[in-house]
Image (cartoon, rainbow, N blue to C red):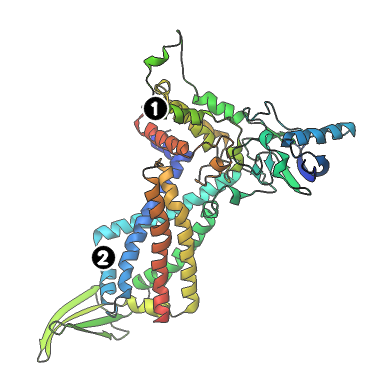
């Protein structure tokens, strides 16, 4: 059995969107290395409640790495030190006894802090509403075999579709750019026949919405892809760059 | 809004212009480096000085050079604007941010590297471009080639000497042989004199490191911005970006001041 951990946590506390916020330091003792990072926060929050203090607000939902809610910037990296994981999949065995862990919310002007570690990511929803869909107005589902799709394209589309919209790409990017998210959502449809009718319009409108939300621009540092829990590839950003320019040049709008 | 304005004012369009001007500046570096290799010739600067006349008089080169000045200014100006915009996208900074864990440091410091290069261009233009075109320090030199014996002698003209055309060439012969005389502004000598200053040499060499690091990220990044990211070509783009643009080009440029300093 591994030795349990005693840790110092420096956590961002902010009462509401208007509050200035500051760091507070908490000691947590006897933390099992098998706990997830969120379970460690549960333990801390239980104690804060017992002590009559305000527990730390943080987002979480599925706790199995698919909801994309657990937005924590841990020791300078989104979702902490491991690659390809969300915060709920980060285990305390990734830390050492006596460590000080700094936990901050995502920092980006389109992601305003609601409380403590909770940010409002509805900017992503507005980008999806702008064009991240296909329009099927009526009728039954078609026979799947009537639409031949090359296996490679299907795989590539599926890889893009594995984006959970967690916002780690924006959080990691030095410019708070949303290019990886938007490009994944553009690519998953651009690669499939169902996405073709609205392909040009989609990329132009999603890029316009992304810009109006106030995200920064892409400088191809690759930090987004390196920190993405689903390891979405930079090739999707390249595809969106191509699609955007060719859509602007060739569309009638 | 006009579609062209709309396209180039979007975040993707602006990056597209950055990539386009950046790659254009890369092609300029190739020409500039190859041309300047003539500084290494042991001909008292004849080849280099006649090349300098060609570069400042040939109409096509003149047009391209104005396009080049515009690109430098645009690339720098747009770069600063994008940095300001990107800073605004994160008004509250992280207390701890571990950029080294997920990206190369050159890619995170393009603005600083670019600023160093911009300041270098100002110094460099003052040293040579301004002095050559408007300064009074660059004198004329006559090169006397013996056509039969294939020997070359250079003779600096009086400091007060001046001529209307940038290059004067005459053939003459006397009892000792046939000669071809070329009289040009001696930019080569200006280069040789300037690069005897140790601090200027040090500045030039250090700035070439900034060029190397800027292009290490910049060249490859431009292709990604154009949407060229494909397993068939990425190896070649990376190879050219690293070995040619961030090693051979800056090293060749750095070798020039060092050559004259130790000569």
Mark 1 surroundings within 10 Å by alpha-carbon count, few (fewer than 14), some (14 through 19), many (20 or more)? few
At x 46%, y 14%, the residue is A136
Quarter of the image that includes the N terminus of chain B: top left
Taking depth in this image into account, of A17 and B74 the one nearest to the observer is A17
Q: Could you tell me which chain the residue with mark 2 belongs to? A: B
Residue B231 seen in render: yes
**Residue A91 in the figure: left or right of residue A174:** right
To which chain does the residue with label 1 belong?
A: A
- Give left or right: position of B38 versus B121: left
Q: Which residue is mark 2?
A: B57
Nearer the observer, B164 or B109: B109
Q: Where is residue A133 drawn, in percent x and y?
A: 49, 22
What percent of the width, then of the height, locates residue B62?
Answer: 29, 60
Q: Secondary structure at mark 2?
A: helix
Q: Looking at the rendering, which quadrant does residue B73 occupy?
A: bottom left
Q: Which of the two residues, B244 or B61, is positioned nearer the viewer here? A: B244
Q: Is residue A8 above or below residue B254?
A: above
């Amino acid at each position: 059995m591994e030795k349990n951990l005693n840790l110092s946590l420096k956590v961002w506390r902010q009462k509401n969107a208007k509050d200035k916020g500051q760091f507070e330091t908490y000691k947590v003792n006897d933390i099992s290395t098998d706990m997830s990072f969120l379970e460690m926060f549960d333990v801390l929050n239980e104690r804060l409640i017992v002590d009559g203090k305000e527990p730390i607000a943080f987002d979480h939902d599925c706790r199995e790495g698919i909801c994309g809610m657990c937005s924590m910037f841990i020791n300078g990296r989104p979702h902490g030190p491991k690659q390809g994981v969300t915060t709920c999949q980060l285990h305390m065995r990734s830390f050492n006894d006596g460590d000080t862990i700094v936990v901050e919310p995502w920092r980006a002007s389109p992601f305003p802090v609601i409380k403590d570690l909770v940010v409002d990511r509805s900017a992503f929803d507005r980008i999806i509403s702008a064009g991240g869909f296909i329009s099927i107005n009526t009728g039954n589902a078609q026979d799947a075999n009537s639409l031949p799709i090359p296996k490679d394209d299907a795989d590539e589309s599926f890889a893009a579709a594995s984006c959970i919209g967690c916002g780690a790409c924006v959080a990691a990017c030095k410019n708070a750019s949303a290019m990886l998210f938007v490009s994944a959502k553009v690519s998953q449809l651009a690669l499939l026949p169902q996405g073709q009718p609205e392909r040009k319009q989609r990329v132009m409108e999603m890029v316009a919405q992304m810009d109006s939300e106030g995200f920064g621009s892409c400088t191809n540092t690759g930090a987004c892809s390196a920190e993405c829990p689903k390891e979405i590839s930079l090739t999707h950003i390249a595809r969106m760059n191509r699609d955007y320019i060719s859509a602007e040049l060739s569309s009638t709008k | 809004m006009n579609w062209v304005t709309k396209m180039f004012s979007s975040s993707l369009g602006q990056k597209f212009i950055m990539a386009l001007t950046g790659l254009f500046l890369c092609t300029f570096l190739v020409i500039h480096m190859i041309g300047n290799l003539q500084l290494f010739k042991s001909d008292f600067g004849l080849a280099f000085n006649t090349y300098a006349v060609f570069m400042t008089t040939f109409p096509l080169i003149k047009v391209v050079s104005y396009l080049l000045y515009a690109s430098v200014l645009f690339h720098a100006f747009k770069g600063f604007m994008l940095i300001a915009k990107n800073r605004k996208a994160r008004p509250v900074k992280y207390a701890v941010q571990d950029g080294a864990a997920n990206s190369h440091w050159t890619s995170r410091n393009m603005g600083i590297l670019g600023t160093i290069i911009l300041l270098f261009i100002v110094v460099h233009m003052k040293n040579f471009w301004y002095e050559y075109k408007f300064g009074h320090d660059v004198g004329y030199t006559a090169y006397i080639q013996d056509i039969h014996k294939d020997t070359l002698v250079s003779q600096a003209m009086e400091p007060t000497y001046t001529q209307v055309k940038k290059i004067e060439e005459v053939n003459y012969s006397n009892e000792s042989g046939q000669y071809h005389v070329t009289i040009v502004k001696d930019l080569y000598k200006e280069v040789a004199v300037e690069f005897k200053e140790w601090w200027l040499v040090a500045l030039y060499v250090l700035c070439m490191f900034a060029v190397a690091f800027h292009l290490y990220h910049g060249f490859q990044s431009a292709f990604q911005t154009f949407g060229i990211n494909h397993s068939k070509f990425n190896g070649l783009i990376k190879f050219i970006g690293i070995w040619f643009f961030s090693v051979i080009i800056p090293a060749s440029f750095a070798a020039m001041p060092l050559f004259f300093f130790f000569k």
